[in-house]
Image: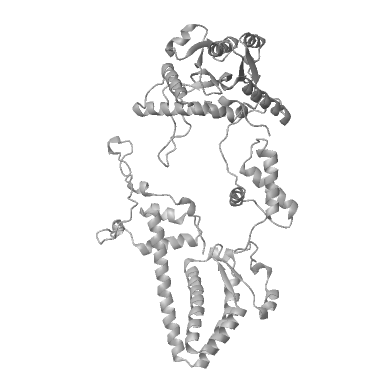
Amino acid sequence: MNKNNDDNDNNNNDNDNNNDNDNNDNDNITSKKIKNLREQPFTKSRNPYKRYQKPNFIWSDVFDEIDLLKNNFTKRVFLIISEKYGINYTTLRNKYSNFKNTNVDKTNKIIKNEIKNEISAEIKNEIKMEIIKEIKTETKNVIKSDIITKTKIELKTKKKAEIKAEIKAEIKAEIKAEITAEIKAEIKAEIKAEITDKIKNSINIEFNESDIDTETENIDDSKNLNKKKSNKFDIKKNEENRGGSNKIFSESDEKEIFLFLKEKFMDKHKMLCDEIIKLFAINKCQQLYPEKEFNASNGWCNMYKKRWNLSTVKCSISRNASKIYTKDEIDIFLKECLDALAEVGPELFFNLDETKWYNINVSQKTIHIKNEDNAKININGNDKEGFTLTLIISAIGNKLKPIITAKGTTERCLKSYLLNDDVVGTYSNNGWANNGITEIALNLIYAKTQGKKTYLLLDQFSSHRSDFIKDKAKEKNIHLIYVPIGLTYKYQPLDVSINGILKQFAKTLWRKEVIKNPDIKISNKDAVMHCLVAINKIRKNTVKKSFENSCFQKIE
């Protein structure tokens, strides 16, 4: 029998049966009732099929219609019938399965009674002759000549009555073989041993329900029959080795594929997707086993990733660094940081970095009603509006005053922020840090260290590397250490953990405001308040660990 691809549609269709009211009527909207998962004792008063006690249809007609659609090779049969009659999808499948099982049981009883009556009226010798002649000759000649010679095309064009008759004949033949074997054992142990051995050694019939193809293994004394058969009606061999091992690659082959992907893609942070894995596996199979057919299905790709501990993740996209550093060059940078730490201590080792801070921290994902395609996020304001935040932290865990840089040409652009003494307000033409703003950061560090020898770790942004900043830092006894280009995500403390934590805190604060008032508009003042609250939530121990996990790594 054909198996329709209904497994992909196993969704609850209860909403489609209950939505009779107008969806635009907000007064009639109610929350969905959640069923109690705790098991309850069954009583006569509980009737889970109460809605189907007086249906406006006949179940047998519904089941006949399902059989008709299945025989016509229609896809998504149960979904079509459930929508037509308003029957729950899972209930329809369960009732159909029970209906089929009940019919098979009735057929079994009828056939068993028929065979018992026949055998009880005959002599033991007649039973022996009947079993040997009917099972052996009828199975060989009738089943092989009638069932095996039927192809897929003929089965598709058959009418409903012919298909039912064929299915009944197949079921009857199978049940007859089983029942006769049982009766043989009851009548005479000698006949059972002889006939069962002959049948097992001579006849083996299999039915593949997925394609309605009949697959048989010829017995030893029927080898000459295969030569007489035409190529048109040859039976397909079990080329897919169903029930056996379908593994196309050996363990060493899969390891070789993994090492290639790791070396060429993962270690170099190149984009790697399922399609690349499948294409490479197909090429590998053609090189190693040209005689085998391999399509690298999605199922194979998922199992391969599972075996080798691979998963598809969401990641950030970064540009390739303009310079590739060797391990020796990175070790020199790490040694410089460790030597500076040993010289001045953690209280005089600082890190400075700028990051973009948005007023509205909205997520790209939202929760929406199923089967509705108008999902979008409306926000009250400009999601690109924000300011540049300059942070300064020390290896001992201290945080200096944050610097906020607004976009503008005069101090009037800072008026809407309503800044207090906990933050330093600045402005620039493009809203980014420049030499003047970086000098303000150096002054904050100098006020903290009182002219003591200090080390400052920062990236190679243009305003950080200018001669003006280098001279100002030298005047204040601040020694600059630059993170290698393109490696700030790995060796700059603020990029390693602090910036991400701050923005996550800000998202939480923004969501709390939205809960109180979904139509709220986050102003510049609110954004600064969220920023300061998030900074105060960062603990000293978190700051210390950010240094340990970045620029203070041990040199291997």
Quarter of the C terminus within the rendering: top right
Where 372 sits versus 163, above or below?
A: above
Q: Toward which corner of the image does residue 495 lie, by quadrant?
A: top right
Picture residue at 52% right of the left edge, 24% below the top? 397
Name, please, the residue furthest toward the left: 45
Horizontal side, residue 271 vs residue 67: left or right = right
Picture residue at 53% right of the left edge, 86% below the top? 192
| Residue 512 x, y percent position in the rendering | 38, 28
Q: Who is closer to the viewer here, 296 or 545? A: 545
**Which scheme is used to colour this image of the protein?**
one colour
| Residue 39 x, y percent position in the rendering | 33, 56
Q: Who is closer to the viewer here, 56 or 222? A: 222
| Residue 42 x, y percent position in the rendering | 29, 60
Where 377 sits versus 108, above or below?
A: above
| Residue 527 x, y percent position in the rendering | 44, 20
Horizontal side, residue 122 vs residue 60: left or right = right
Q: In this view of the protein, can residue 326 be seen by the observer?
A: no
Where 436 sits versus 209, above or below?
A: above
Report the number of numbered marks. Answer: 0
Picture residue at 38% right of the left edge, 26% below the top? 513
Q: In this view of the protein, can residue 408 be seen by the observer?
A: yes
Q: Toward which corner of the image does residue 438 lie, by quadrant?
A: top right
Picture residue at 67% right of the left edge, 81% below the top? 221
Where 447 sits versus 16, above or below?
A: above
Horizontal side, residue 87 vs residue 217: left or right = left
